[in-house]
Amino acid sequence: MTTKRYDRFCVLRDSFRERVEAWSSALPELADAQRELARTSGTPAYAVETPVVYNRDLDLVGPGDRVAWVLVADNPGKKEQAAGANRYLIGPSGKAAENFFSRELGVDFRSRTVIVNKTPIHTPKTVQLRALAAGRPRITAVLEESQAFMAALVPELQAALGAPVWIMGISELGRRGIFAPWKAALLQAYSRASPGLLDGVYVFNHFSMGSFATELKRRRLPGETTPRAVLRIGAENRARSLGE
């Protein structure tokens, strides 16, 4: 990437790191709430080590890298929040994504994607964000604030890196979904962005539970190559889920 692009990426990355630090400081009670959530939800015991997770892989992006995709996942799970990790998409879904990108798209997932989440707040499962915030106004406020920040970051990264956006996960983007605030903030951010930038956004089902693979198999046209199918399906999902 050019020096100008890399410098802009560094500004965005550092701003994200600083916000994670600020949110962590603002919610000293978050780790206890996450431990309580694990107990009450029957989640097998694990150590809550990083309540709000910055993706350390962003620090490995260098000026000579060619970024193929900006990928937006949901939120950090148990493996991602471990103190020795603090990296996004390193569980089963990440492995499935890594295999698909390498096998079908010819893209090294770990070196040629920049991964962010819709929120950096940890829960073992994404749907548990609702229970984590319930009855806790301070956590609710930071959850919504973090979604707005992360949504605004997407077109900024897209423009800075000159790479298309892969949004992973559709089910919680609806009006009552956990990520409805993120979706609203994303559309607002793109309304302020350069015309046509939204055309470079593609929306897909999650790699977990084989949802992405099932959709691709079902909707792929006869004779259609995988890269073409991915772009077509992602664009159709964008129109439907983001309400273009």
Image: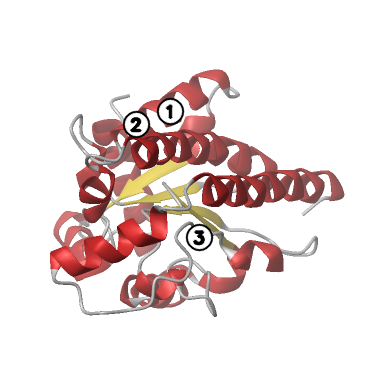
- Mark 1 to mark 2: distance in Å? 6 Å
Q: Give how far across and how far down residue 13 sits, in percent.
A: 67, 50
What residue did someone put label 2 on?
181
Placement of the C terminus among the 4 image quadrants: top left
Q: Are marks 2 and 3 in contact (CB under 8 Å)?
A: no
Q: Residue at x 50, y 26 (%)?
A: 190
- Mark 2 to mark 3: distance in Å? 19 Å
10 Å crowding of disc 1: few (<14), some (14-19), many (20+): many
Q: Residue furthest right?
A: 3
Q: Give how far across and how far down residue 139 sits, in percent.
A: 37, 42
In the picture provided, is 58 more to the left or to the right than 4?
left
Q: Secondary structure at mark 1?
A: helix
Q: Secondary structure at mark 3?
A: loop
Amino acid type for the residue under numbered disc 2:
Pro
10 Å crowding of disc 2: few (<14), some (14-19), many (20+): many
Q: Residue at x 19, y 69 (%)?
A: 39
Amino acid type for the residue under numbered disc 1:
Ala
Name above or below for residue 197 compared with residue 170.
above
Q: Give how far across and how far down residue 45 sits, in percent.
A: 26, 79
Give the quarter of the image for residue 192. Answer: top right
Name above or below for residue 79 compared with residue 129.
below
In the picture provided, is 199 more to the left or to the right than 140?
right
Q: Residue at x 18, y 54 (%)?
A: 219
10 Å crowding of disc 3: few (<14), some (14-19), many (20+): many
Q: Give how far across and how far down residue 115 sits, in percent.
A: 52, 58
Which numbered marker is on residue 131? Answer: none
What residue did someone put label 1 on?
185
Q: Secondary structure at mark 2?
A: helix
Q: Are marks 1 and 2 in contact (CB under 8 Å)?
A: yes
Which numbered marker is on residue 53? Answer: 3
Placement of the N terminus among the 4 image quadrants: bottom right
